[in-house]
């Protein structure tokens, strides 16, 4: 049974540890999809020049290059040196998927999907063996009941997961609806309808709106 684990780890001893030592106000957020062998990290907090200086001075970082920018944050493609503790790579080696990762005040919070709870235990041990003491903040199983609590059918849930995994919700999108429909083996129209029903189920569930309320509620004017 698939499980989701939210894991806190200190940046100390990892590839980003020296960055937080140099600029303690730094905030990081992992870009889920980036066309590179390294990691895409959005860096913010200090000025760009301070971030650049910290990247150059950090011995754990092999190469880096700026990919993009967005207001007061910058997206860098970062590769760590071979002997550096890379928690993201450890997750992948243990068969997990990093759904999201962000850091501030020198602490990373990773949301990881694994095949079962035994895999969480194995991942915990790997991180601990590398002197990256993890803390399991939350652990839950993605049972069918979890889907139904949000009003999702199993197919709708699986479709949303596939859309996330293939970068459909990224900006810009990493996969088109046509490509995603081919990946799932369904028609473009069927995918569109399934996503719309899933969106509606999630919105009505999260906003505590009944189907009757949604049907009669007027659309507010701008």
Image (spheres, rainbow, N blue to C red):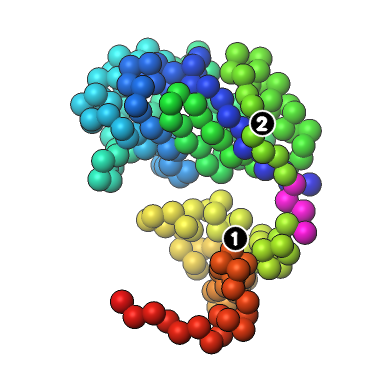
Give the image location of residue 74, x and y in percent: 29, 38
Q: Indicate whether residue 118 is drawn in magenta.
A: no
Residue visible at 35% across and 28% down? 26
Looking at the rendered image, the quarter that the C terminus falls into is bottom left
Mark 1 = which residue?
160
Mark 2 = which residue?
136
Q: CA distance from mark 2 to mark 1?
A: 25 Å
Mark 2 neighbour density, 10 Å: few (under 14) some (14–19) many (20 or more)? some
Q: Is residue 100 above or below residue 106?
A: below
Q: Is residue 50 above or below residue 69?
A: above
Asked if the residues shown at circle 2 and circle 1 are in contact, with their CB atoms under 8 angstroms apart, the answer is no
Give the image location of residue 99, x and y in percent: 56, 43
Q: Quadrant of residue 94?
A: top right
Q: Is residue 154 above or below residue 187?
A: above
Give the image location of residue 209, x and y in percent: 59, 73
Report if residue 70 is visible in the image: yes
Span of residues in magenta? 141-145
């Amino acid at each position: 049974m698939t499980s989701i684990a939210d894991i806190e780890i200190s940046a100390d001893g990892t590839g980003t540890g020296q960055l937080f030592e140099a600029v303690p106000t730094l905030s990081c957020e992992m870009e889920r999809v980036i066309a590179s062998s390294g990691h895409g990290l959005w860096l913010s907090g200090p000025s760009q020049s301070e971030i650049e200086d910290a990247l150059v001075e950090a011995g754990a970082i092999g190469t880096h290059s700026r990919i993009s920018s967005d207001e007061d944050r910058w997206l860098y493609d970062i590769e760590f040196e071979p002997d550096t503790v890379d928690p993201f790579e450890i997750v992948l080696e243990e068969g997990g998927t990093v759904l999201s990762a962000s850091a501030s005040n020198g602490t990373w919070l990773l949301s990881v999907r694994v095949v079962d709870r035994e895999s969480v235990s194995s991942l915990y041990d790997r991180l601990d063996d590398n002197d990256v003491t993890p803390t399991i903040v939350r652990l839950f199983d993605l049972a069918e009941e979890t889907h139904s609590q949000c009003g999702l059918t199993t197919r709708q849930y699986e479709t949303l997961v596939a859309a996330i995994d293939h970068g459909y919700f990224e900006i810009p999108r990493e996969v088109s609806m046509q490509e995603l429909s081919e990946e799932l083996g369904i028609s473009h129209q069927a995918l569109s309808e399934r996503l719309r029903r899933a969106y509606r189920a999630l919105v009505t569930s999260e906003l505590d709106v009944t189907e009757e309320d949604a049907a009669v509620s007027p659309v507010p004017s701008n």
